[in-house]
Amino acid sequence: MDRRYFLFGSFASAAAARAASFQSANDRVRIACVGFNNQGRAHIGAYTKMPDVELAALCDTDDAVLEKGCGMVEAAGRKRPAVYTDIRKLLEDKSIDAISIATPNHQHTLQAIWACQAGKDVYVEKPCAHNVFEARQIVAAARKYNRVMQHGTGASAVLHETREKLQEGIIGDLYMARALCFKMRNTIGRAPIEPVPAGVHYDLWLGPAPKHPFTKNRYHYNFHWFWDYGNGDIGNQGIHQLHAARWALGVKYPAKVSAVGGHFLFDDDQETPNTLAATFEYNDGGKKRMLVFEVRHWFTNSEAGLASKSDAFSGPAAGATQTVGNIFYGRDGYMVLGNGFKTFLGKEQVPGPVSTRTGGDPYRNFIDVMRSRKRSDLLAEIEEGAISTVSVHLANISYRLGRSLQFDANTMRCVGDEQANAMLTRAYRAPFVVPKIG
């Protein structure tokens, strides 16, 4: 593999010059979207609405998806972007200021590190890392190369207000949070091995992951349900709720993690659990707190008024209830966080203060911070996203091993459990090896 794909140090001066030039609102930020068969479409939609941003390039390993992406850009009245199938070639373009990543989970960290090395700022979708080792390296890369990096955990002005109010004592002394991800997920069935479709660059799509024969169930959205590429629904929809619960609770790494669950109802290709209950115990500053995370995949009840109607299915399941959000518990009452928050106080559960803030577009926020270089203004700075991502992986390891884990945040290791520690990283398929940055 050509060494230039890994060593982008020569781009540093060009990146600095570009950063200086787009601090003026009259200069467009040139951005590239990488991966947009699903969530990445939101990236394209956001950037094409911004007059001070040029969506200069698109990158995907599926030629058909690339063409659809170009169509989206042109339909928005923008110039047709340059196209790439290999992100390493894209990163050689010194005029690109940032990349916005919505590829499968197993690609996130390596692509973000490459981008940092190339002098690009990064918006990276959740979870930012496929394992605990990667979560540490992506933060180290952002710091070493002094890059702005936003994490796609759906942070908003409401979440920031939630944290502020909870820390101020709106429901009294906090002791527990719940993160609920009761989302309709149908069976994926079984898909046979077949030839790689024309226009699909499968080796690039696999990247760091082991090579398997191609099946449609391992590709595009269903990658979430295979351990080699995804992290189950706790690392898909669930990390939004887990991050909100952890961050607003005011804790970082858990001291103990226990998870149980299984793959219920369906006989299909899915490897990850579709039902999971994980508990996280914290002892930050000598103060015990607890977080409970739950995934359910099928019909469910509402909890604390968080129910909404799912548009995921047609037929008999159309309009089924799903419950996605957070509940926080304190000495004086509880708070429910969905699109906004509501509080209920005292033993009579009298309605209390509600959220007042709206907005907080993370894509707009990313561009604004690229201009200001004030990392503290990011709605979802990468370090906090990485902490939540570590929690996802510890829960999955506990589930897969069938036992509780004691975690030492100082060493970033599971105490007395070498089998668990071996699962903090993975064997990488050359040349797609995530480097140790720090």
Image (tube, rainbow, N blue to C red):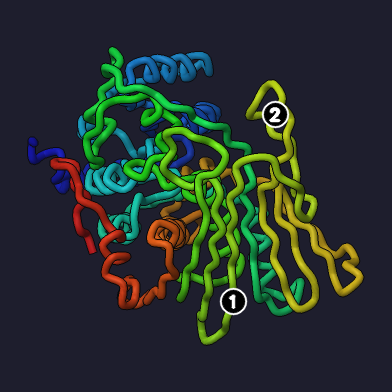
At x 8%, y 40%, the residue is 3
**Three-letter amino acid code at the position of disc 1:** Arg
Residue 10, percent across and down?
A: 14, 45
- Give the numbered dot on residue 317: 2
Helix, strand or loop at label 1? It is: strand
Residue 350, percent across and down?
A: 90, 66
Q: Where's the C terminus, which quadrant? A: bottom left
At x 57%, y 71%, the residue is 250
Image check: 360 left or right of 173?
Answer: left
How many angstroms separate mark 2 from mark 1 (CA)? 37 Å
Above/below status of 404 relative to 194: below
Q: Quadrant of residue 206?
A: top left
At x 41%, y 54%, the residue is 373
Please tell me which residue lies in front, 357 or 211. 211
Above/below status of 423 relative to 371: below
Task: Give the residue number, with chain letter if any, for mark 1.
Answer: 289
At x 71%, y 47%, the residue is 339
Do labels 2 and 1 touch, CB within 8 Å?
A: no
Q: Can residue 175 be seen here?
A: yes
- Give the numbered dot on residue 334: none
Helix, strand or loop at label 2? It is: helix
Mark earlier in primary sequence (2, 1)? 1
Query: For the residues carrying marks 2 and 1, which lies nearer the camera in this image?
Result: 2
Above/below status of 405 relative to 17: below
Q: Residue furthest left?
A: 2
Q: Can residue 152 be seen here?
A: no
**Three-letter amino acid code at the position of disc 2:** Ala
Please tell me which residue lies in front, 291 or 147. 291
Q: Quadrant of residue 417?
A: bottom left
Q: Where's the N terminus, which quadrant? A: top left
How many other residues sit within 10 Å of disc 2, few (<14), some (14-19) or many (≥20)?
some
